[in-house]
Structures are given as C-alpha cells and as structure tokens.
Image (cartoon, helix red, strand yellow):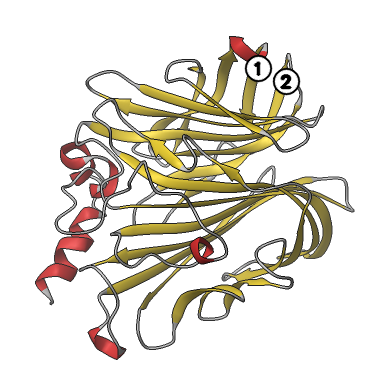
C-alpha cells in the first residue's frame, strides 16, 4: 500500500484523534498552504476546489417537513483530502475524495459513504458552472454561482432528490471568511449560504415523501484547522422563527474549550461574535453506538438575548462512516424557537 495513503487512513482511526486533534486535523501543515487573514474570498472561484490546501469540504444540511407531517433531516457532504499539494493528471493525482449522505427521521437514521481518487473523472468540483460530485451523487448549480442548486444522493435503503433556492446573501464566517479555531491561531477559510428554500422528494423503505424546508451550505478549507490538543467539536447551525440564524461551535481542548459564533440577521447581514461570547452546555447524554453523546444542549448568547435548549430529533443519528461522528436535525426552544442541525465529532 502507498505509504502516504496508509498515513491518511491512520488519521481516520479513533485513537489518533487524541494525539493530533480529531481525525488528524491538528497535524502540521507539511508544505500545504495555510489560511491567510489578509486573503479576501472571491466568487465564483472559491466555490471550487483549493488543491494547494490539505483538506476541504462542501457540506449541506436541510431540515424538512413531509406531506405526512413528519420532520426529517438530510446531510450531503463531499470531502477532499490531499496526499500532496496541487493537482496532477490521471492516477498521479494526489487528491482523495469521500462523500457522506444521511437521511434522518424521528426513529430511523440512514447513512451512506463513498470514496474516489482524483484525476480520473470519478469525483471533483468545478467552480463555474458549479458542480460537486462523486459518482452519481451531485450538487449541481441550476443558475450562476450557487444561488440555485439540485442535490441528489442514494444509499442502500434511501435516496433524495432536492432543489434549493437561496433567499439571502453568502455569509463570510469569522473575519471576512478567516475563521479562527484555536487560541494558538489555527484557522480555516469558511463561508456559508445559510438561507436555502428546499423542495423535493425523499425515498424511504415505505415509499416516497414530498418535503419542503430550509437548507444550509457550509464551505471550508484549511491544512491545519485544529490544535493538536483539540479532540473534537460541537457545531450548531440554527434557524429561528423570527428570521435570525446563528452558526456556533465549541472545540473541545485539554487546554480549555474554544467557542465562536456568527449572528445572522433576517436581512442576511452577519456579525461575528468574539471568542467566548457563546456558552455551550450539554444537558442530556444518550447512549449512542456504545458511547455517551450529548443530545440536548443549552446555548446562551447574551449579546443577542439568546438562551435556548437544542434537542436532537433522533438521538441515535450516528454516522457509521470511516471516521464516525454524530450528525442530525435538532429542534430549538426557549428565548427563540426554530430548527437546525448539530454535528459532534470526537466522542
């Protein structure tokens, strides 16, 4: 086996997370590009891939309601991970691709994973017209940029085909898209489209379900986004009934947890809050896949009058993928009501 490929696979082993940050994301940048706080994101170019960086993802979640009155959630993620900087033709490409798809109901959680090599046409991303794909899983633009998308994926027991139309502007997370992840200054380039209207069809073992709802796309790339002492994260994307939205995360660290948040007004304008402004407290722990995982949380953001409980729609939304993690839709009660998504790694 290629020694570098073996090293990459070792990064996915749970035991490695403690030593080098979750999934090896705290390892040294090793000749890859690192995020620059002076860099200003440019579109449509930054919708595409950044092969000079080691890791990157296109990550979309949606909270949905079916014609049957039930709540659902879906996830679609394409990861790019590089063995060496930049691209090459054919089998010489150092780019590796992996895709995750999930569909969550109140009592079921469906998961699928696919992998591909770069350079041979099996997976990739183009910026304009925008297309992200692995095999027949696609996120494809149906208008310039990423204003309108079609989205599809399928697994052994599920599939979905959705259309998305943005109802607001892109949000640059952190400082103009430079998102700090630790007190040591580890960072990523990070932007979101948090305001898609979603329609389409989910196909479940019991048959198809027409759905509507709200979608959120995150785009992030880096080469060393975590500190070596950070063991995982708790990431929230929340949409409130009043039209406001919030992205917030806690990075768990033996040297002290690191939190960050962005408040998004109904008109789409965004404000990055300082580190520590968001308080994140687990309230209820569920037994999931043989481990304790927090599935109800208290979030407080005093600067915005926010004090809410965030509760998993399905506590058993465990991603049985190469690096396992928890991912699923949540409901929000308290000072603000709404729905959102929660991702938790490193448990």
Instruction: Quickly name the residue at label 2.
Output: 333
Instruction: Quickly name the residue at label 1.
Output: 308
Relative to 317, 200 lies left or right = right
Q: Quadrant of residue 256?
A: top left
Q: Quadrant of residue 19?
A: top left
The residue at the far left in this view is 3
Q: Quadrant of residue 97?
A: bottom left
Expressed as whole percent of the image width and height from the top left, the position of residue 245 reads 68, 32
> Residue drawn at (24%, 39%), measured in percent from left and top?
21
| Disc 1 crowd, CA 10 A, few/some/many (<14, 14-19, 20+) | some
Relative to 109, 29 lies left or right = left
Pick the residue in front: 206 or 171: 171
Disc 1 + disc 2, Cβ < 8 Å:
yes
> Residue drawn at (32%, 71%), measured in percent from left and top?
96
169 to 346, vertically: above or below: below
Which label's residue is closer to the chain start, 1 or 2? 1
239 to 64, vertically: above or below: above
Expressed as whole percent of the image width and height from the top left, the position of residue 154 reads 61, 71
Relative to 240, 98 lies left or right = left
Pick the residue in front: 287 or 236: 236
């Amino acid at each position: 086996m290629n020694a570098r490929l073996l090293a990459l696979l070792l990064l996915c082993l749970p035991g490695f997370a403690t030593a080098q940050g979750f999934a090896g994301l705290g390892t040294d940048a090793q000749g890859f590009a690192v995020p620059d706080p002076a860099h200003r994101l440019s579109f449509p170019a930054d919708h595409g891939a950044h092969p000079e960086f080691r890791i990157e993802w296109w990550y979309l979640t949606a909270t949905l309601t079916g014609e049957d009155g039930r709540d659902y959630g879906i996830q679609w993620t394409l990861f790019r991970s590089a063995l060496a900087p930049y691209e090459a033709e054919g089998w010489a490409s150092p780019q590796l691709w992996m895709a995750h798809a999930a569909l969550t109901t109140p009592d079921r959680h469906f998961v699928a994973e696919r992998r591909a090599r770069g350079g041979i046409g099996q997976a990739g991303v183009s910026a304009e017209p925008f297309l992200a794909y692995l095999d027949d899983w696609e996120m494809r633009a149906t208008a310039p940029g990423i204003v309108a998308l079609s989205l599809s994926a399928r697994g052994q027991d599920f599939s979905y085909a959705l259309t998305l139309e943005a109802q607001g502007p892109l949000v640059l997370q952190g400082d103009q898209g430079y998102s700090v992840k630790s007190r040591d200054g580890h960072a990523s380039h990070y932007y979101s489209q948090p305001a898609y209207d979603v329609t389409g069809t989910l196909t479940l073992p019991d048959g198809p379900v027409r759905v509507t709802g709200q979608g959120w796309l995150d785009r992030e790339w880096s080469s060393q986004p975590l500190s070596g002492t950070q063991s995982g994260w708790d990431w929230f994307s929340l949409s409130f009934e009043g039209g406001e939205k919030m992205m917030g995360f806690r990075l768990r660290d033996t040297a002290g947890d690191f939190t960050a948040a962005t408040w998004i007004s109904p008109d789409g304008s965004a404000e990055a809050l300082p580190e520590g402004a968001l308080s994140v407290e687990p309230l209820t722990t569920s037994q999931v896949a043989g481990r304790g995982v927090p599935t109800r949380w208290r979030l407080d953001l005093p600067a915005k009058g926010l004090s809410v409980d965030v509760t998993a729609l399905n506590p058993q939304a465990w991603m049985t993928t190469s690096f396992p993690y928890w991912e699923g839709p949540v409901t929000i009660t308290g000072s603000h009501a709404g729905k959102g998504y929660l991702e938790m790694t490193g448990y």
